Image (cartoon, rainbow, N blue to C red):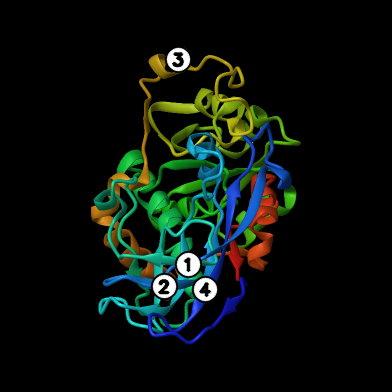
Amino acid sequence: MASIRSTISAKQTRMVIAKKITINKRFDGMPKPSDFKTIEEELPPLKTNEFLAEAVFLSVDPYMRAYAHNIPLGATMVGTQVAKIIESRNEKYPVGKHVVGKFDWRSHTISSGLPSHVQGAGNAPAPYLVPDLGDLPMSYLLGVLGMPGSTAYFGLLDVCMPKCGEIVAVSGAAGAVGSIVGQIAKIGGCKVVGITGSERKGRFLVDQMGFDGFVNYKTDDIAQKLDQLVPEGIDCYFDNVAGEISSAVIRHMREYGRISVCGSISSYNYDVSDPPRVSVVQHHMVRKQLTMKGFQNYLYQDRASEAFQKTLNWLQKGKMKYCETITEGFDNMVQAFIEMLQGKNLGKAIVKV
C-alpha cells in the first residue's frame, strides 16, 4: 500500500502520497514489467464535492491489453477498483464507506463522484457505494457482480438467446467471463462445453462449475473433440478468443446458430496492424445461416442492475459458483496482469491491496 504521511494544517487534515502505475513503453507482444512505471505523486487538498478513496481491491482484465494502444504513454493504466473512502467533502460519499469506481491503477484517488462523460473523458459510470452483499466478498463487484458478470449475462442472454435444451460452447471458459457464461447457460437448461488451455482448467469447469465437457485446445484436436462431445453440433457460441479456435467451433455449429463475440484474446499480443491469419468461416456462416454479433458491455449500463440482481440471487441460492485468483499487494499489479494474460488464473484475477 502506498504510504500516507500526515501533517496538520488549516487547509487539510492529511497529505497523501499516492502511487500510480503508468504505461512506460508500447507493448511488443506479451507485456513486460519494463513496459510500466510506478510513480508517486502528492495529492492536492479536496475541493467541494470531492472525496478521497484508498484502493482495497483492483481488477485486471483482458480488455486492458486490447485497449492499451489507445492509452497515451505516461498515462495511468486503466481499470476498476473497490476502494474505501478515507476523506470526503461530498455528502453522497461518506467517510468509511466503500465505493466501486473506474479509478485505474492507483493506490489513492480523488473523485468528484461524476460519470466520466460529464468530465469529457470516456464512458465510465459514476462511482457507486458498495451495496449489501450479505456474506459475499466486496471483490465480487469486480467480477461476477460487476463488469465480467454483466458481460456474461447480456452477451449470452441478449445476443445468443439460448433456449432450453440447446448446446452452448464457450471459449476462454475458465476465465472471469467464460466461467459465468457456462453457468448461466446451465441454469437455463442448456448443455455446455468449455474450451480452455489445460486439463486442470478443464476439470475445474466440469467438477466445480458444472460444465458438461471441455476441450483442451493445447492438446486436443478441437474438431475431433467436439465431434465426441457434441456430435449434433453447437447452437450458441460465446467467443472470448477468436483465431483458429473460433474457426473450428464455427465449422461445428448447427443451422441458425448464434455467435456472441466478446473478445479476441488470441490476437491481443500481436501488432494491431498485423493480426494473425485464420481459416475462412464465411462459407459456414452462409451455408448454416449463422448470426454473429459483437457487443460491448457499456451499452448495457442502464440495465446493469438487472444483471446484478439476477446474479446475486443465483449466488445466494447456490445456483452459481464463483472463483477468484487473488494476488496480494499493489506493487504486484503488473505481475498479476501478465499472469492473467498468460492464462494462469482460474476465474477472476484480482489484486488485493
Q: Residues within 10 Å of mark 2 (few under 14, many from 20)?
A: many
Residue at coordinates 64% horizontally, 55% vertically from top-left? 38
Q: Which residue is mark 1?
A: 43
Mark 3 or mark 1, which has the lower sequence index?
1
Image depth: mark 2 or mark 4 in front: 4
- Give 11 or 14, whichever is nearer the viewer: 11
Asked whether disc 1 touches disc 4, contact meaning CB atoms under 8 Å apart, the reply is yes
Assess whether mark 3 and mark 2 are in contact (beta carbons under 8 angstroms). Answer: no
The crowding category of the residue bearing disc 3, from other C-alpha atoms within 10 Å (few below 14, some 14 to 19, many at least 20), is some
N-term mark: 2 or 1: 1
Do callouts 2 and 1 mark residues in contact (Cβ within 8 Å)? yes
In the rendered image, the residue lying farthest to the front is 10
Circle 2 residue: 52
Q: Secondary structure at mark 4?
A: strand
| Residue bearing the label numbered 4 | 16
Which mark is nearer the camera, 2 or 1?
1
Rounded to the nearest angstrom, the CA distance separating label 4 from label 3 is: 56 Å
Q: Earlier in the sequence, mark 4 or mark 3?
A: 4
Distance of label 2 from label 4 (alpha carbons): 9 Å
The disc, 2 or 4, on the residue closer to the chain's N-terminal end is: 4
Quarter occupied by the C terminus: bottom right
* Label 2 SS: strand
Q: Which residue is mark 3?
A: 282
Q: Residue at x 33, y 39 (%)?
A: 159
Instruction: Name the residue: 64% across, 33% down.
Output: 269
Q: CA distance from mark 2 to mark 1?
A: 9 Å
Asked if marks 2 and 4 touch (Cβ < 8 Å), the reply is yes
Among numbered discs 1 and 4, the one appearing first in the sequence? 4
